[in-house]
Image: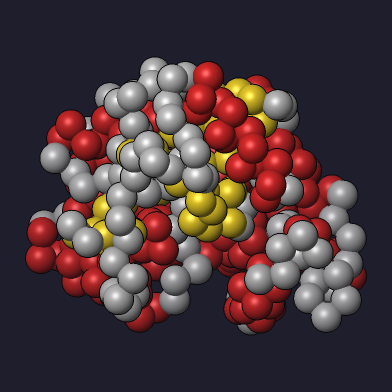
Amino acid sequence: MTETAVEAAATAARSLGLTVTDPLVLYTAFSTVVHLQPSPVVARVPMNLPGGMKEPEPAVRRQQRELDVAWLAAQGVPVVQPTPLVPLKPVEQDGLSMTLWTYVEVDQTAQPDYFAATARVTELHAQLADYPGELAWMTPLRLIGSGLGVAEAVPGLFEQDDVDRARAEWKILESVLTSRAAFEAIFPSATVQPIHGDAPSWNLITTVDGPLWADFEDATLGPIEWDVAGFGPDLCRAYDEAARTRGLPTLDPKIQQVMDLARALQVLVCAPLVPQMPALADGIRMFATQWRAMPFAGGLS
């Protein structure tokens, strides 16, 4: 699959007038990320995704949203930027849809500092609050229902009892979490705004020129708690300390509990991808362990 992504990316780039002689795979997980050498351009080609994300139309919408949110760069926010060498839209080639970005050199010596990164999420939220584009409500949750509907036990990872519990919880949570009106009826004081949508602390790239935010394909309208869902209490405290320092809203513990549960369900429905992506197993196992210790339905039942 990696070779397919590389060939499609190189072909698409050449058709747009870019010189590509030595494409180099930088990273492969849910997407294959390819440096289209010698052009200063990186292609991001989604390959290993849950079924509903593979359909061309939803994939293109998701990618266009990520390109649009790069509006942040014009506001002085340090983000990875789309390449200016091609139009600002997804590119389709050989049945694959991809986006093209400006190449940045990663600092290979840097060690992750998730406490500092989580504290910086407050800055990102302050900037995203002014995003003028239209964002739908909590789009990252939309695949949970369909994913659980076809979920099967994965022995040693996601057992049948887990599948049954997850389905029962989602029946309770779905009406609350998939509607802004329903969510705000239960949590009227929630801070709802445009958010990153996909664990931004884990998507802060340390480059040789400084840290850059990346991976905004799940940008959405939702509670700020979703962006730290599953991080654990220590990192949530780091967020709150930074928010207080900046005079920004802090996390609501009750909302955080529900968001942590929703994040766990979102991760668990990825269990069928483990044969294609074995590295996912450890993360899913960690979330599963945390989830089993959570109150049923996040206390909403």
Residue 84 location (% of width, % of height): 30, 26
Q: How is the image coloured?
A: secondary structure
The front one of 153 and 39 is 39
Q: Is residue 106 visible?
A: yes
Q: Is residue 145 visible?
A: no
User: In the figure, 10 relative to 288: above or below?
Assistant: above
The front one of 80 and 256 is 80
User: In the figure, 167 relative to 186: above or below?
Assistant: below
Residue 191 location (% of width, % of height): 32, 47
Of all residues shown, which one is farthest toward the front? Answer: 21
Task: Residue at 44% x, 76% y: name it.
Answer: 232
Residue 10 location (% of width, % of height): 56, 34
Residue 219 left/right relative to 54: left
The front one of 70 and 110 is 110
Residue 168 location (% of width, % of height): 79, 59
Q: How many marks?
A: 0
Task: Residue at 24% x, 36% y: name it.
Answer: 72
The front one of 222 and 204 is 204
| Rendered image quadrant of residue 226 | bottom left
Residue 21 left/right relative to 265: left
User: In the figure, 114 relative to 176: above or below?
Assistant: below
Location of the C terminus (image quadrant)? bottom right
Task: Residue at 38% x, 21% y: name it.
Answer: 86
| Rendered image quadrant of residue 285 | bottom right
User: In the figure, 8 relative to 292: above or below?
Assistant: above
Residue 171 left/right relative to 43: right
